[in-house]
Structures are given as C-alpha cells and as structure tokens.
Amino acid sequence: SYLGAVHALNRNLGSDGLLLRVMGSYGNYEYDTIGGTHIDTDHFGGEVGLGYQIYSGGLRLAAYAMADYQNHDRTGFDALSVVVDDEWGFKGQLEAETAASAPLYIGLTGNYSTAFDSYWSRARVGWNLGSAAWNLTIGPEVMGLGNADFDQVRYGAFISGLPTLFSLIFGGDSKMAISGGYAESSGTGQGGEDSVYGTVSSSFKF
C-alpha cells in the first residue's frame, strides 16, 4: 500500500514548474527458505524530494530526485537474502505521458533507488473510450520491479479514469484506475512464485 502527494510549488499542477513529492509505503511478505525457515517481513518505506515537469506538444515530462528510506523488519534468518533491516538511498524517477483525454494514451514511468538496488517501472498504452465526463481509458500494461533479492515482470491490462466513491458523492476531481494480470518472478523467496496480480489506485486534486 502506498500513500503520497505531489505539490506544485507554483500552485498549478497543469503548468511547467518545480514539484515537491512525498510518499510512504507499507507491505508484508512471507516465504520459506530452502532450509525450511519461515520468513515473515514487514516493509516500511518513505521518500521525499523535488522534481520538475514540462508540458510540450501534448506530453507531460517529469523528473524527480529524492531521498529514499526502506526498512525490511524480518523474523527468521535467510543466508541468501541481502535485503534486510534498513537502508537509505538516492532515488531518481522519470515520467512521460500523454493527456488522459488523448485518443491514444501512452504512459511511461520508471524509478531506481540505491537503497537495496530497488526499481519499479511501468509502460501503458490505452485507448480513450470516448466518455467526455470520465475519460475512460483501457489497454495493456507491462511492469518490471524488484531489488537485490528478486525480479518480477508483470503482463496485464488496465482501465483508468473511473470515478471514485468520493467524487460520486461529493464531486471534485478524483479518479481511480484498476489493473491486473500475470506476474513472473525470479530470485530468492521474497520474489514469490509466478502468480496473478491486481492493483487499485486513486488520485485526488485539491
């Protein structure tokens, strides 16, 4: 689970300018080592930094430089794992996307952190379904994520521009996206076995 905010220092998210980004995360994963030891880990993370965005020719381009903190609070010992306890690192992120209302949507996001050599990336291509009110977009996505212990590739589909319960009741500019598909994993136990995946995300402008 993730919770974060991006603030435009010029108070206009729809224009070129500096951005302040803050995000926190929490997760849990369990696995058994080759020797049969059960590993149970709570993961906490946080990041803060500055970025800059540019709007050009129907594209939004953004780059961030951030301080990144990760903590893997583990019960049990795994001699093959190097992702344990806490570590600070530098995190960079790049984003490129077309407007949500474009007939063909393209969205590219990727980041890398020196904390445990963590990375996350996603590519989406979607078709606008022509809903003037919601800008519903549907299409395929490919994701890559991992750290020093595991790597995972995800193949799936997404739909974005869905109204949230908050927007239906109170109005305002809030949207939701849903995606799901198949995940292929490799590495030590925390990568897990191949499986299905699903995500739900919401954004609010205020």
Image (cartoon, rainbow, N blue to C red):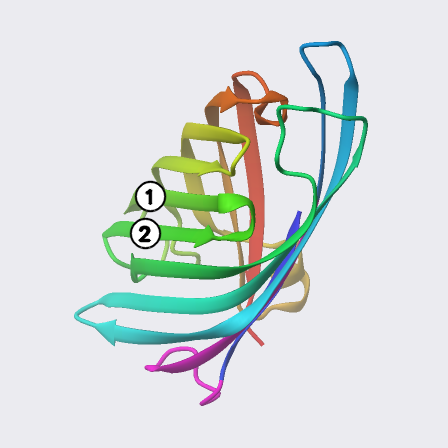
- Left of 148 or right of it: where is 165? right
Which callout, 2 or 1, points at the residue further toward the start of the chain?
Answer: 2
- Left of 145 or right of it: where is 59? left
- Left of 56 or right of it: where is 73? right
Q: Where is residue 151 in the image (x, y as percent from the top left)?
A: 47, 30
Q: How many marks?
A: 2
Q: Is residue 99 magenta?
A: no
Q: Where is residue 135 in the image (x, y as percent from the top left)?
A: 38, 55
| Residue at (52, 72) in percent of width and height | 49
Quadrant housing the C terminus: bottom right
Name the residue tied to disc 2: 107
Asked if residue 143 is positioned above or below residue 15 in the image, the reply reads above
Instruction: State the mark number for residue 61.
Output: none
Near mark 1 (Cα within 10 A), the count class, few <14, some 14-19 or many ≥20, is some
Spot the residue most to the top.
35
| Residue at (40, 33) in percent of width and height | 157
SS class, disc 1: strand
For badge 2, the amino acid type reads: Gly
Residue range of the region highlighted in magenta in the rendering: 9-26
Asked if residue 40 is positioned above or below residue 5 in the image, the reply reads above
SS class, disc 2: strand
Spot the residue most to the front.
79
Let me know if residue 100 appears in the view.
no
Name the residue tied to disc 1: 123
Residues marked 2 and 1 touching at CB (< 8 Å): yes
